[in-house]
Amino acid sequence: MTEITLNRVVGIDLGTTNSLVAFMQGERPVVIPGEDGSNLVPSVVAMATGRPLVGNAARKQLVEHPETAVYSVKRLMGRGLEDVQEEIKLFPFRIVDNLNPDEVLRLKLGDREFTPPEISAQILSQLKRNAERYFGAPVTQAVITVPAYFNDAQRQATKDAGRIAGLEVLRLVNEPTAAALAYGLDQKHDGVVAVYDFGGGTFDISILKLHEGIFEVISTNGDTHLGGDDIDNLMIAIALDDIQGDLGIDARKDTSAVQTVRRAMIEAKIALSSEKSVDVDVPLSDGRHYLRTISRTQFEQLIESVIQRTAAPCRQALADAGISPDQIDEVVLVGGSTRIPRVHALVDEVFGLSARGKKPHTELNPDEVVALGAAVQAHILGGGSVTTDNVLLLDVTPLSLGIEALGGVVAKIIQRNSTIPASATEHFTTGVDGQTNVAIHVLQGERELAKDCRSLARFDLKGIPPMTAGLPRIEVKFLIDSDGILRVAAREQRSGKEADIEVKPTYGLTDEQVEQMILDSFDYAEDDLNQRQVIEARNEAETLLTLVDRAPSNPAWQMLSEEEVKVIAARRGELESTMRGSDHKAVRDAIEAVDKATRRFAELQMSTAVSGAIQGRTMESAAAELGEGPTAPHPFAAAEIEGTSKQ
Amino acid sequence: MADYFALFERPRHLVLDTAALEKDFYRLSRQWHPDRFARASAEEKQRSLEMTSQLNDAYRTLKDPIARTEYLLSLEGKPIERDKNVDAKQIPADLLEEVFELNMQLEEMRAGGDDPDIRADLERARVNFEKQMEDAEAQLKSLWIQWDGVSAAGESAAQAQILDSMVALLHRRQYIANLVRDVRAALGAE
């Protein structure tokens, strides 16, 4: 293994609907396909039989056993129970009952419980495996993209997911910034660019200034709960009403039926981006069908309110950047929802594009562009090359950072749209003689009152030397790092003593919890590997048995001695019984034994068959060419786990 | 911690070419940004993070004319109080009459709905105060030039006098800015 492959850093787009992994191949980024050849891994996770399924396999599970599967889990990242009341109404999230309001959410999948970062970690693990299969080498470092408008807790949760999946997250990159990077790398144009990123569950708008390889974000805005999902939910609600009204079936309680309707509505939505009208036909459990024609006009009326919600963040971002729409040189469209013609129209309206003879950029696949940009940034962090040598991203924090002051008001200490890393230094003192602790409440958001902002963390400055009230002078340094995540350091200046601070995230996982999850995932990973090896060995055994059973019809079989035929039958029987067990090594040994017993038959078969056949072939190697059996075990399957356990 | 002017290798001057500042910001960012230290030691990473956060804070402060002036005043020991409540106490004397009139108009606008006459009065007030704000900013710029001249020459008495004038002018500007904000809000302009 060369050093280059060891240091390969991948870029990951961990999306609400789909996730992708990409890397820099030579001078341009490419998406790494999964085993099924598809670039997109649906962000669906199912825990069917203790063994996690991710992507298309999990999507099937979602319809057949909805209680074991979950989608759009990104909506729950870094959020508390109170935040998600709306989501629970619209999505089939099965949140555990006995949850405290300030606890990390836990979801039930089958008979087990998972936090959102653990579920996201399953998706990341799948992408990691896809990349490892592609490279034939371990992948341990990644850049992961997040919505620009993600707050601190949501970012931290994403980083935790990476760690649980066994990935060192070198950087969180904002999705629109990544998209700009993917575009900018090709075009090398200087100017002011707006990236309109309307995905499955989130909306972001970022305004950037491009100058000689510098990608400077000037402002960003968005809504972390606005996306294609919301359009789907509107359509599903109408379909379910129709089904109740026309057919008298209350399908809402039938989770499997809801998922069937959901898939049909998503297909209709996609079709309506290119068709003027679409006929929906959903088979229901009683054999009847829900039939309806949806015209694009109806569709556009239905979704207008959702699409309009993207306009205000665009205007705010323009105002924050201090520029007017006509100063935007280019608009880049990102995210699957930008395929909707009405969305194009809105973008055109907001930025006055066609009036200026311009068109938004859609040259790069809107589903892939974020992952491609992440790959570019991954490449830069991995050491870069001539292509990226001049490239530098300067991103901003989307939300103001503040601390709660007297009377519950928020004192802003870092303004939104400040270039990160950004810092602020504040001084605190005590209110009571001899006080040794000061509690600090950090918030994120634009509102004036603490109760209206997002609580990030509460922490105590401990170990302040006892002094008269007001005398201690505690300097606290707040720093938002390049991932957009807060770091805090404190010092009591009169005594020069470093204060002990414990930052307790409001809805986050503690380091200890993440460590435990990493350990758990290794346990399951070994479990998973074992199961996978058993399955692969069984598949191979089945192929071999088929060949053995067909053998007597081959003329070469007649040339075997009675003794040889007996040995083959005995080994065959042993293999058949061994393969039912769960010891993959025993199955392998039995395969080997059958193979050995049939070696002479294989040779005879070769020599009696068409000339030119290669001598010394065994039945097993013939099986490998059979073509119709399952794919041979992946040579890297075992090394993946060895690689991680060596760390 | 180096002061922001020193970080950008500049004297404490207030007349500043923002295009040149941006160029320096990009150059220093290329030098210090954490992206350039992704594979460096923990110490180097930490230093890069601290340097870049300072650089970003410095650029944000210096590129904005008001923030730059306020920063210089704090460096020179005359920090501007940013408390919103000080406004009322410090109505610039020459504005007393206009402010009194404006408050009446704003009051009427709130009480009596959208009367076209009051609206026209407020529009005039808006133009007036926007003009005054421009004047204040022009005066500030002339103070910058004076400051740069005397600070280069090291005339400390003249320096102190200019600093005091800037403090007064910034208070006045802030006061007018708040008026403009209120009038615009009442007119629903923004």
Image (cartoon, coloured by chain):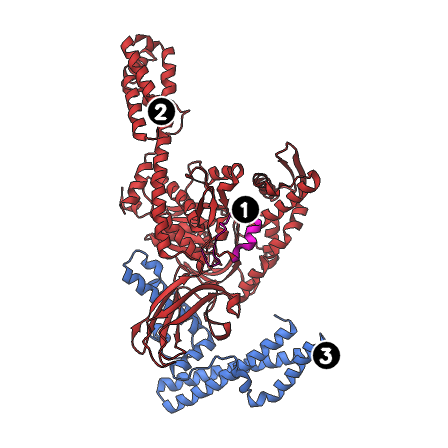
Chain colours: A red, B blue
Q: Are marks 3 and 1 in contact (CB under 8 Å)?
A: no
In the rendered structure, which amino acid carries the disc numbered 1?
A: Pro
Decide if residue A310 is on the left or right side of residue A158. right
Check disc 2 and report the residue beneath it.
A541
Which of the pair B79/A319 is nearer the observer? B79
Q: Is residue A576 magenta?
A: no
- From where the camera sits, is residue A372 visible? yes
Q: CA distance from mark 3 to mark 1?
A: 57 Å
Q: Quadrant of residue A462?
A: bottom left
Q: CA distance from mark 2 to mark 1?
A: 40 Å
Which comes before the other along the chain, label 2 or label 1? 1
Could you tell me which chain the residue with mark 3 belongs to?
Answer: B
- Residue A253, x across and y down, in percent: 60, 42
In the picture as drawn, the residue positioned furthest to the front comes out as A98
Give the magenta-colored segment's residue range.
A82-103
Q: Is residue A294 above or below residue A620?
A: below
Q: Are both tags, 3 and 1, on one chain?
A: no
Image depth: mark 2 or mark 3 in front = 2
Q: Quadrant of residue B22?
A: bottom left
The residue lying at 51 percent from left, 38 percent from top is: A65
Check disc 1 and report the residue beneath it.
A92
The residue lying at 53 percent from left, 55 percent from top is: A84
Check disc 3 and report the residue beneath it.
B117
The residue lying at 73 percent from left, 76 percent from top is: B115
In the rendered structure, which amino acid carries the disc numbered 3?
A: Asp
- Residue B56, x across and y down, in percent: 40, 68
